[in-house]
Image: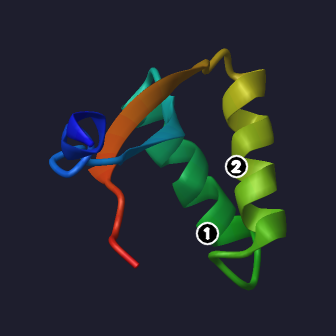
């Protein structure tokens, strides 16, 4: 049963990938435009409009990985 003892100290990690803008100032200006244009912010339509405007102005995205400890059940 020695092989089972190896897994007692094993910790599971959850890796979450999140989209992050490469140009934060451009993204902030696009969000400000969406706040002024749409009646309700935050909403799916407003965020979609801001993302579309960000891409149109040449903004790009990257994946940022966040490593978190998985909760015990």
Seen in the image, is 7 located left or right of residue 33?
A: left
How crowded pointer 1 is (Cα within 10 Å; few <14, some 14-19, many 20+) is rated as some
**Residue at 72% across, 84% down:** 40
Of mark 1 and mark 2, the one earlier in the sequence is 1
- Residue 7, x across and y down, in percent: 27, 43
31 over 41 or under it: above or below: above
Query: Does 25 sit above or below residue 68?
Result: above
User: Dividing the image into 4 quarters, which one contains the N terminus?
Assistant: top left
Instruction: Mark 1 vs mark 2: give the one in front.
Output: 2
Is disc 2 surrounded by few (<14), some (14 to 19) or many (20+) residues within 10 Å? many
* Image height of 57 relative to 13, above or below: above
Label 1 – label 2 distance at C-alpha: 9 Å
| Colouring scheme, one of rainbow, by chain, secondary structure, one colour | rainbow
Quadrant in which the C terminus appears: bottom left
Where does label 2 land, which residue?
50
Residue indicated by mark 1 = 35
Front residue of 43/71: it is 71
Where does the image place residue 61, in percent across and percent down from the top left?
58, 23
Rendered location of residue 50, percent (x, y):
70, 49
CB within 8 Å, label 1 to label 2? no
Seen at 66% across and 15% down, the residue is 58
Q: Which residue is at 64% across, 78% downward? A: 41
27 left or right, relative to 34: left
């Amino acid at each position: 049963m020695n092989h089972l003892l190896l897994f007692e100290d094993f910790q599971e990690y959850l890796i979450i990938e999140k989209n992050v803008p490469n140009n934060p100032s451009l993204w902030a200006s696009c969000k400000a435009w969406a706040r002024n244009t749409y009646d309700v912010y935050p909403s799916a339509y407003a965020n979609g409009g801001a993302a579309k405007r960000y891409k149109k102005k040449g903004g790009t995205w990257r994946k940022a990985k966040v490593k978190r400890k998985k909760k015990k059940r």
